[in-house]
Image (spheres, rainbow, N blue to C red):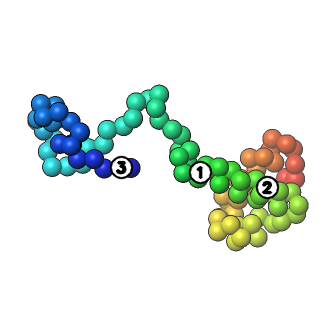
Amino acid sequence: MKKTRAQDVLPEKLLAQIQQYVQGCTLYIPKKAGERRAWGEGTGSRKELAQRNERMRREYRAGARIEALADAYCLSPDSVRKIVRGAAGKAGQRSL
């Protein structure tokens, strides 16, 4: 999140009005509802996690054990189960 000095971007009168409510602290002003992006869209994190999860599902379908996947991906066995169950439950693949 980028920090911007209020006095650099706001008109003096508006800044004075805001100072009636808050002074000397950080104030977060969210984007408008239509301009927000979903988590991970800007950094590519969402895409990377989706690719990692698909690799995990393929490895699981190929016979990898939950515990081995948990160690390989530094996740808890419960997290791995949730990931592989997401696709396995829909496609009727190997049961946990």
Residue type (three-letter) at the residue carrying disc 2: Arg
Residue type (three-letter) at the residue carrying disc 1: Gly
Residue drawn at x 26%, y 44% is 27
- Residue at image mark 3: 2
Answer yes or no: do the residues labelled 1 and 3 have beta carbons within 8 Å?
no
Q: Is residue 77 left or right of residue 2?
A: right
User: Is any atom of residue 17 visible in this view?
Assistant: no
Q: Which sits earlier in the primary sequence, circle 1 or circle 2? A: 1
Q: Which quadrant of the view contains residue 89?
A: top right
Q: Which sits earlier in the primary sequence, circle 3 or circle 2? A: 3
What element does badge 3 sit on?
loop
Q: Position of residue 15 (x, y in %)?
A: 15, 36
Residue drawn at x 65%, y 64% is 76
Q: Is residue 31 above or below residue 92?
A: above
Q: Which sits earlier in the primary sequence, circle 1 or circle 3? A: 3
Quadrant in the picture for the C terminus? bottom right
Choose between 13 and 93: the one closer to the eye.
13
Q: Is residue 93 left or right of residue 81?
A: right
Label 3 neighbour load within 10 Å: few <14, some 14-19, many 20+: few
Measured Cα–Cα span from mark 3 to mark 2: 37 Å
Q: Position of residue 25 (x, y in %)?
A: 20, 49
- Residue at image mark 2: 57
Q: Mark 1, mark 2: which one is toward the viewer?
A: 1
What element does badge 1 sit on?
loop
Q: Which quadrant of the view contains residue 91?
A: top right
Q: Position of residue 71 (x, y in %)?
A: 70, 71
- Residue at image mark 1: 44
Tally of numbered tags: 3
Residue type (three-letter) at the residue carrying disc 3: Lys
Choose between 56 and 68: the one closer to the eye.
56
Q: Is residue 17 above or below residue 54?
A: above
